[in-house]
Amino acid sequence: MGKIVFFEDPNFKGLSYETSCDCPTLHAQFRRCNSIRVEAGCWVLYERPNYMGYQYILTPGEYPDYQHWMGFNDSIRSCRCVKNVYGKVYKIRLYEKPDFGGKMVEHGEDCPSVQEAFKLHEIHSCIVLDGAWAFYNESNYKGRQYFLERGEYRQHEAWGATSPAVGSFRRITKF
């Protein structure tokens, strides 16, 4: 199981809240979040309640301020522990068109540049066959993050994106 500790102030100071389970709303636990310690597991944090808004994927470690987890601000309002990160097999199918149309690429490793590796400018749909994945809207694992677990995503809105721009992606592993 996972374990995460949220702190209202930078450098692990101020009011703290610890959890080992998914939390669809965190507004009663703290007003703002400026540092985090992930003690076990991998976590997806959301800017808004009910797993909505900007997503941040954190692995075990210390994050002394929100910029260390690539946060845009100090608002964390829901979180969930990532399941399916302990397997050895990771596989994803990427499609250049919605509803699994157009060119298809199947991949099982991290990809720092979708454009260079597959000559795809956009990914409109995908199927996660095994593992959990993070999409980034820029190459080299930068920009907005999107969490994908096993399942079908018929259009980019299904993983929370406002555009089909995927610059890079990586497997979410326990470390």
Image (spheres, rainbow, N blue to C red):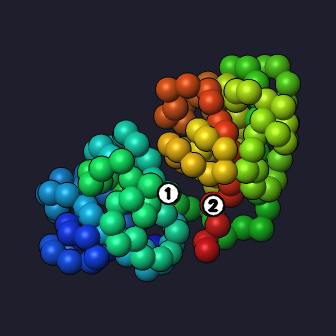
Q: Is residue 107 above or below residue 98?
A: below
Is residue 82 left or right of 72 when viewed as pictured? right
Q: Quadrant of the C terminus?
A: bottom right
Query: What residue do we see at 25% from left, 70% from top?
Result: 10
Asked if the residue under mark 1 is in contact with the one under mark 2, i.e. CB atoms within 8 Å, the reply is yes
Q: Give, as a three-letter code, the residue at label 2.
A: Ile
Residue 156, position as x, y percentages in the image: 59, 28
On the rendered structure, is 118 left or right of 131? right
Disc on the earlier residue, 2 or 1: 1
Question: Which quarter of the picture shows residue 85?
Answer: bottom right
Please tell me whether mark 1 sits on a helix, a strand or a loop. strand
How many residues crowd around disc 1 within 10 Å: few (fewer than 14), some, or many (20 or more)?
Answer: many
- Residue 17 seen anywhere in this rendered image of the structure: no
Q: Which residue is mark 2?
A: 172
Q: Could you classify mark 2 by the number of other residues whose Cα lies within 10 Å: few (under 14), some (14-19), or many (20 or more)? A: many
Q: CA distance from mark 2 to mark 1?
A: 8 Å
99 lies above or below 105? above
Residue name at image x 82 percent, y 39 percent: 116
62 sits left or right of 49 in the view? right
Residue 59 percent coordinates (x, y)? 52, 69
Q: Which residue is found at the position 70% from the left and 34% from the top?
A: 126
- On the image, the x and y values in percent for residue 28 come to 14, 57
**Residue type indicated by callout 1:** Ile
Along the line of sight, the residue nearer the viewer: 70 or 170:
70
Q: How many marks?
A: 2
Q: Secondary structure at mark 2?
A: loop
The residue depicted at 27 percent of the width and 77 percent of the height is 12
Vertical placement of residue 101 versus 56, above or below: above
Residue 71 visible here = yes
Tag of residue 40? none
Residue 57: mark in rendering: 1
